[in-house]
Image (cartoon, grey):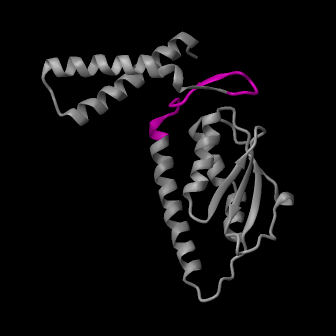
Amino acid sequence: MRNKYQQIQAHFFELSLGLFAVWVLLSGQFEGKFLLIGLCSSLAIAYICYPLLNITNERTGKVYFVFGFNFLKLFVYFLWLVKEIVKASVEVACLVFRPRMDYEPRMAYFSMPFENPMASVILAFSIILTPGTITVDVNDDGIFEVHALTKGMAEGLMEGTMQRKVAALFGETCEFTPMPEAETTHIPKEVC
């Protein structure tokens, strides 16, 4: 386990390297003086921005780096999420093109208390990106309030697959708890 100072150095180096790579790709300049300017700019920007990229868990006081996850795991999660978005898009398109509007909108609730606040953000955004579901609220205790267009979409969320994948992405244990007793089903369709 690395100590705090080594973690800060590693995160600073990764941020600087990432910024420098973006600079090289966007500039297309490979002369020594331009590479030196890009390197100095990347280091300066990383130095200025690094404190802004640390977030604190309000319950525990532990500080997390925003990009403190495995990028290979993120890429695998992203591919899985794209597949889920396509599946949900087809489902919503079929629902829209039906001659009768026979969907059942509902509010679904589940508890997923993450240690890292960034994990809650990634999960909330993943739910929003998936057509037919919208994250309405996430409270401090990790209870998510999600609007689902159909019963099937709400049940899909209650399986906890997305929650487990986000927990694995951040190296956390999955403490997913569905809350079907809190589910609201009487939402007027005109509101949706």
Q: Measuring 24% from the left and 35% from the top, which residue is drawn there?
A: 25
Q: Is residue 6 above or below residue 114?
A: above
Image quadrant holding the N terminus, namely top right
Q: Which residues are magenta?
A: 57-73
Instruction: Examine the structure image and report whether residue 64 is included in the region drawn in magenta.
Output: yes
Task: Examine the residues drawn in magenta and state their main secondary structure.
Answer: loop
Q: Residue at x 12, y 23 (%)?
A: 31
Q: Position of residue 129 (x, y in %)?
A: 54, 56
Taking the image as drawn, is residue 115 in sight? yes
Q: Quadrant of residue 151?
A: bottom right
Foreground pick, 176 / 107: 107
> x and y percent of residue 11 in the render?
47, 21
Residue 105 falls in image quadrant: bottom right
Quarter of the image holding residue 71? Answer: top left
The answer to whether 86 appears left or right of 159 in the picture is left
Left or right: 147 in relation to 12: right
- Pinpoint residue 122: horizontal percent, then vertical percent: 58, 44
**Up/down of 185 relative to 167, above or below:** below
- Which residue appears at 56% of the width and 64% of the height? 131
